[in-house]
Image (cartoon, rainbow, N blue to C red):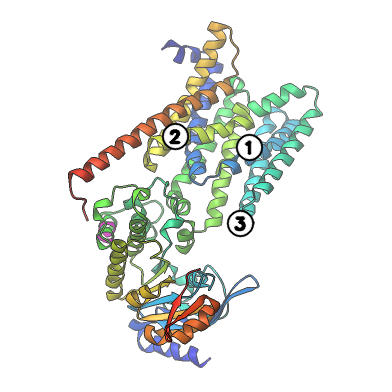
Amino acid sequence: MTEETTTGQVTLEQPGRTAALVLDRACVAYGDVPALEELDGVVHPGEAVALIGPNGAGKSTLIKAILGLVPVVRGRIEVLGTTPARARREVAYVPQADTLDPDFPVSVEQVVMMGRYRKIGWLRRPSAGDRAEVAAALERVGLAGRARDRFGTLSGGQRQRVLLARAIAARPRLLLLDEPFNGVDAVSQHALLEAMAALKEQGTAVVISTHDLAIAHLACEEVCLLNRHQYGFGPTESVLTPERLRAAYGGQALELRGDRVIVTRT
Amino acid sequence: MNILFEPFQLPFMARALTQLVILGALAGTVGVLVLLRRLAFVTDTLTHTVFPGVVIGYILAGDDGIFWGALVAGAVTAALLTLFARRVSEDAALAMLLTTLFAVGVALVSRRSGYAADLTAFLFGRVLTVTEEQLVQTSVVTVLVVALLAVLRRPLMLRMFDPEGARAAGVRVGLLDLVLNAAIALVVVASVRAVGTVLVIALLIVPAAAARALSDRLAVIVPLACLIGAAGGWLGLAVSYEAAVSHGLRLASGGTVVLVLVAMYVLAFAAGILRRRLARSRVSRAVSGEVEPA
């Protein structure tokens, strides 16, 4: 309860610094089955947080809850100072590229234009401004030359970059990425990290689910360590400690040379 | 060339042609969505569940009841399918629904005296007896469905390409799915008297698949599918007329239309392979000739 009033005051005093995401003893459930319990944490504009945890820890579920697609049964998730469902207009979601049908007849440019749909509406033709946004977003991820190509002809990493460009074109205040580095080559990984850094500089808050601890270190200053419960939320160095990782990963963590932990992907 | 125009100076042939051209365009448009959403089996289910509606409509109100009976059955199935799809992805449940309702239709028809003739008409249609009133019905349905899909094209595209992303963007995916299922049902309903419940599936799938083989751009695929559907109807009718008149060979017009469509698909498929091979050699030339832009 005290937490709630504190965040409320922050919102009142500094309207420009409304937290991008507030988790306040949030419990998320599918029907009667609890998926995540007692999550606490705050992400501010321009910050990035990595959701770390083993498979089935509830990383994707948390992203869905932030989008308002899975209900919060107890506690509270506040996005950009309002409810997840109401904030959706200013939130962009980047799915895993390999979940999309590579045969779908759509060009790179068209995919990125989807990010503008909400601003364009159902009937209006895309304006010169919309086209410029699309071009700029593709430029940002280093794929300006591939605009006319079919989406499916690109490599996995390039497709992931196109999906990030789509999110950039929507000009979100909060960006959610589901395992954006899975099966992504080094060139694309670098392009993704650079584009994300630029977004953060503009004040976009970023949430990345990943099981790659190295990436979490590179891309994010904060970590939310999850496995059904929260095992820590805060600066990367203080959360990704061997003790906490061992606790979160349970039997899936292997110990090496005393204080270093290797986490097996399952 | 004459066989393409001469037969259609007869009023009944002209009506049949008009009907098939309109249906070809309608089914072509909806068919592209069916293809991209991989809803062929769902569509097949719809065609079979509309069948008992057709029979009941016919029993209650004769020929005029067919459209309305089909419409009710189509609407109910579209709603059921949308609900079903949310629960489980269930081939078996669909197959059960399909055969059960089809059997209901067959059982109902079998109680009538002209059993075989009626059954044939419901399953394969009677395109040569199309009336002015049917043409009006088909046109209205076509305008409605195409306008609706045109208005919803952006959310539909997003939903087809990236359902999770669509949900995240606030698109009402369930509602859109209902709209598409209803559109498929309407195509089936509009086609029932002309081509029957069995052949309509070809009208939906084949032109769309042919168009997809020829292009990677949706803005080309949709009109191309319409064109192929309409051309298949025209050519099929002409061939079956010519076979009957000049060669004394009776070819059912519905079946001939489907066979012509399939032949067009085979050509499109071959052309598609050629097209892709050309594109690939162009790409490899470009790659070997210059440094790929970063």
Residue that carries the numbered disc 3 in the rendered image: B86
What number is the disc on residue B47?
A: 1
* Residue A44: quadrant of the picture: bottom left
Is A195 located above or below residue B187 in the figure? Answer: below
Please tell me which residue is depicted at 37% across the width and 41% down the height of the picture. B216
Q: Specify whether B169 is left or right of B10.
A: left
Is A170 located above or below residue B23 in the figure? Answer: below
Residue that carries the numbered disc 2 in the rendered image: B225
What number is the disc on residue A175?
A: none
Amino acid found under the numbered disc labelled 1: Thr
Query: Contact, CB < 8 Å: mark 3 with mark 2?
Result: no
Q: Which residues are magenta?
A: A133-137
Q: Chain of mark 1?
A: B
Pick the front one: A174 or B275: B275
Pick the front one: A54 or B87: A54
Dot 2 alpha-carbon crowd within 10 angstroms: few under 14, some 14 to 19, many 20 or more:
many
- Dot 3 or dot 2: first in sequence order is 3
Q: Which secondary structure lies at badge 3?
A: helix
> Where residue A25 appears, x then y in whole percent?
53, 84
Q: Main secondary structure of the magenta part?
A: helix
Q: Chain of mark 2?
A: B
Q: Chain of mark 3?
A: B
